[in-house]
Amino acid sequence: MQLKDKVVFITGGAQGFGRGVAEAVLKKGGKVCLADVKRDQGEATAKELQTSSGADNVFFVKCDVTNVAEFEDAFKAAVSKFGHVDVMCNNAGIMDERIWEKQLEINFTAVVRGTMMALNHMRKDKGGRGGVIINTASMAGLMPTYWFPVYGASKSAVYHFTSSWAQNPEMKAAEVRLASICPAGAKTALLDLDDDQIIHHGHFKQVMETAEYCTVDQVVSAFLMAMEDDTINGTALTIRAKEGVVKMKLSLVPVE
Ligand SMILES: NC(=O)c1ccc[n+]([C@@H]2O[C@H](COP(=O)([O-])OP(=O)(O)OC[C@H]3O[C@@H](n4cnc5c(N)ncnc54)[C@H](O)[C@@H]3O)[C@@H](O)[C@H]2O)c1
């Protein structure tokens, strides 16, 4: 997909990876809707991006993705502002094992909701224009991580759900592709953790002191690849500091 004039909806768009993706899409001539629970941060980011890329190309909507009505209304608001949505990035996430049910709701349940909402809107076989759905998982979803078992499980679920939908034969006529983004650790606000947010925080901190973090730019390049490369479907794009972006696809049945 060429991003010029395309509309990209990004949950968790106020900061971190979401903001980085918005900037990159705008540079390619696209339009963005930033949806985030942080109103002040979201409005400030939108203002900055409007200044650099044009007021009409950036739209912020306050939205808690665990609030069904707010999430649906935010998506409808983007459709009404821009006419349609071409790319859905279900990217909002938290890491907090203390509130594990909430963590599952944000990191997985809302991703299911956002995917189904976007799919119904995009499906060409049901009157839509086709599109791409990109869900933010994590390397932590592809390997065991005893520091944050529920976080890891939520990301594993995102990967499984996303690649399973990609395999659905109806997606060919729907002209909707799906991919998951699986970054290793990156220095964003997500990792500003209180000691009790994860298990054995001291050990995690020690490991991360010597770990090589991937950069936000590397993660953003994976998002762009998922949007622009029409051969990507059902793929998990892993991102590590040294390897960069690697396409990973495991399947029992062939996925076109
Ligand atoms: N930073 C990392 O090391 C890393 C690695 C792998 C995956 N991820 C994933 O990347 C995604 C983006 O995280 P980030 O690293 O940019 O961190 P971040 O904390 O900077 O961004 C997360 C954004 O999600 C928003 N958000 C949280 N709960 C929300 C809710 N209920 N409704 C709407 N928005 C909500 C936050 O306000 C924030 O703007 C997350 O899904 C995270 O799990 C991050």
Image (cartoon, rainbow, N blue to C red):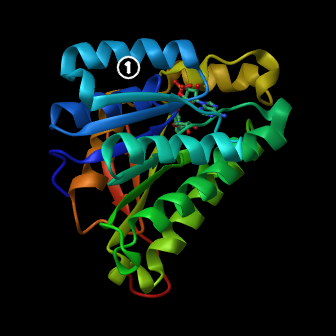
From this view, report whether residue 35 is shown above or below residue 194.
below
Q: Residue at x 32, y 67 (%)?
A: 130
Q: Residue at x 36, y 52 (%)?
A: 85
| Badge 1: residue crowd in 10 Å (few <14, some 14–19, many ≥20) | many
In the image, 75 versus 21, the foreground residue is: 75
Q: Residue at x 57, y 43 (%)?
A: 73
Q: Dividing the image into four equal quarters, which quarter contains ligand 1?
A: top right
Q: What kind of residue is marked 1?
A: Ala
Q: Which residue is mark 1?
A: 46
In the image, 181 versus 248, the foreground residue is: 181
Instruction: Report the quarter where the N terminus lies.
Output: bottom left
Label 1 secondary element: helix
Task: Using residue 244 as the reference point, say whether residue 36 is left or right of it.
Answer: right
Q: Residue at x 40, y 45 (%)?
A: 80
From this view, report whether residue 141 is shown above or below residue 179.
above
Task: Estimate the x, y position of residue 113 in percent, counting from the top left.
Answer: 62, 56
Q: Residue furthest front?
A: 80
From this view, report whether residue 212 is shown above or below residue 256.
above
- Residue 90 makes an appearance in the image: no
From this view, report whether residue 158 is shown above or below residue 171.
above
Task: Estimate the x, y position of residue 143 in percent, counting from the top left.
Answer: 61, 53
Task: Estimate the x, y position of residue 114 in percent, counting from the top left.
Answer: 56, 53
